[in-house]
Image (cartoon, helix red, strand yellow):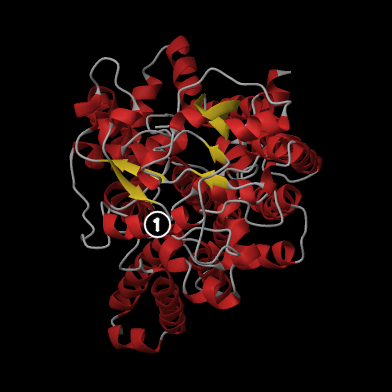
Amino acid sequence: MKEKFKSWAFSKEHGKCDVITLIIYLLGVCTVSFFHEPWFDEAQAWAIARSGSLKEILFEIPHYEGHPPLWDLILLPFAKLGAPYELSLAIVNIFFMTLAVAVLLFKSPFPKLIRCLLPFNFFLFYQYGVISRPYCIFVLAIFLAAVCYKNRNEHPVKYLLCLALMCAVHSYGIMIAGGLCIVWLIEIFIEYKKSGKLAGILKDRRCWLMFCLLVFALLVMAAIVPDENVFLGGKTTSETEMSFPIGVGNILFYFVMLSDAIFTSFYNYGMDISDLAEQLPTIIVLIFVFIIFMVVLHKNRKLLTFIIPYSIVGVFGSIVYASPHHIGVVTAFVIFTFWIIVEENGSVQLPDRMLKLYDKLGGKLKFVIKAIVFLPVLIPIAWSGASSYFDIRYPYWFDEAADFIKEYHLDDYKIMGMWQQLIKGDPEDYTYFGSDESDYEWYDYPEIQGVSVSLDSYFDKNIFYNFNIDDPNKVFLYYRANTQEQAEETFTKWQEQGEPDIVINRCEITKAYPNIDVDDYVAVKRITAYKPYKFTTSDQYITIYVTKDLFNKIGTLEELTAQKLY
């Protein structure tokens, strides 16, 4: 029985098992997607496709979004034609991600057991399979690139088209594609140098095709280069410059990106990269693991192939911008790297010293080592299960809030959405006993309203009178920085519309309406928002307030005990 299992598990034949795995994957992703409520990032893409013009989507919005417009263009016909919001997002995302998994199952050289477990990796199943973002196309592109890698010198067009798709879908795709091309150019240079015909490199078809890819990548980069007023990198007003401070946390993140992509979970939503410095002792151990990983890649002659693209991504993520969901890009790249190693060598070769040390171990220790080596496959599957459970079990909140608004026809009244605020100074200055948000001093960004974007997706119009007040037909936001004088100008426009009847979530309403009576508002709905990531969820309360007059007019609302607006 044991021998039969080994024979099956390490077989590289493709067949019924791959078909069954693909069906299970598709059913699993569809099931979780049925319960999933789109997060803000998903809603923003839908809102762009729904209310942005083609000119804005191609030439203006990408400067604020930071990624190419391909995903928005794919969603555009669905959103413009009035297709169902949640269903359309899920169908498009599942389509691309299922294609990616099919490529993995039917084209990868991995042993059957590994091949049939990988689709249930956290990033392939939940983060990129359930959550509808452009990463599904990135995964498809990099898996197709892995298929074409072996014959890239004989058929460079196929390989470079895959890299071009990576460039077209995400900024991280540009970095990885660029890194792979740098490595390829080094290999071509060495090839010509050894032959003694270095001048021939200028006539090489592969180099000219890579030049074409470079031109394409530069055009994409020109489309997404941040606008001078983008809300990014410490640029909190339109008068300040972007700044990217470097500390211990930034350096550690370079190593954490790899370990979190495989089997650890140091970096989560709600964290800042600088917080990693608090976990320094543990991460130092992971640096040792990182070195071992590099040694294995060196043995398999793929160190440069991995380290150059990874370093570009790692440095950018460490210094400029990264979010936990970006870690999956590294996961896909790790799979790509081992894919091309196994394709070329038949298996992953270990350094001689490692093999000698392993041979000296006893039977039990060998079993422990094998179990540890298998953890990078099993732990991400457990993450998938946990996050899928959280998504099914707990609401995110937008859907419930939209249903509440529709039930009581609150969209017939003036609804105010909360806006982005940043604390002035050090948050630690406000941690004295009994302090809350009303004691803080804030910078205001009234045009950045993520709640409004997310809730508007459930309606056929912009239901917030204070959102995009100069162009209310737009239901997406621009990540624009502003001065506080500009914020005051926006508040003045709100005041001209009168005081709100409904306020979505607790905010500093007196900043926009200095003379408003906050005691005139009562809380009528509280919803807990849960956002899963691996084994954890980040949760918060969302509160809906109405005026006492509207409360009495409706007559069937229930007043809740909650913190007042301030």
Tell how many labels.
1
Answer yes or no: is residue 556 visible: yes
Looking at the image, which residue is at 65% across and 51% down?
A: 457
Residue 533 position, x and y percent, is: 52, 32
Residue 528 position, x and y percent, is: 57, 26
Relative to 497, 511 lies left or right:
left
Answer yes or no: is residue 479 visible: no
Looking at the image, which residue is at 67% across and 57% down?
A: 461
Residue 100 position, x and y percent, is: 65, 53
Relative to 435, 135 lies left or right:
right
Q: In the image, what residue type sits under mark 1? A: Thr
Which quadrant is home to the C terminus? Answer: top left
Q: Nearer the viewer, residue 317 or 372?
A: 317
Which quadrant is home to the N terminus? Answer: top right
Q: Which residue is mark 1?
A: 492
Looking at the image, which residue is at 55% across and 62% down?
A: 145
Residue 188 position, x and y percent, is: 37, 73
Q: Is residue 65 above or below residue 504?
A: below
Q: Nearer the viewer, residue 195 or 9?
A: 9
Q: Is residue 234 above or below residue 381?
A: below
Relative to 33, 383 lies left or right:
left
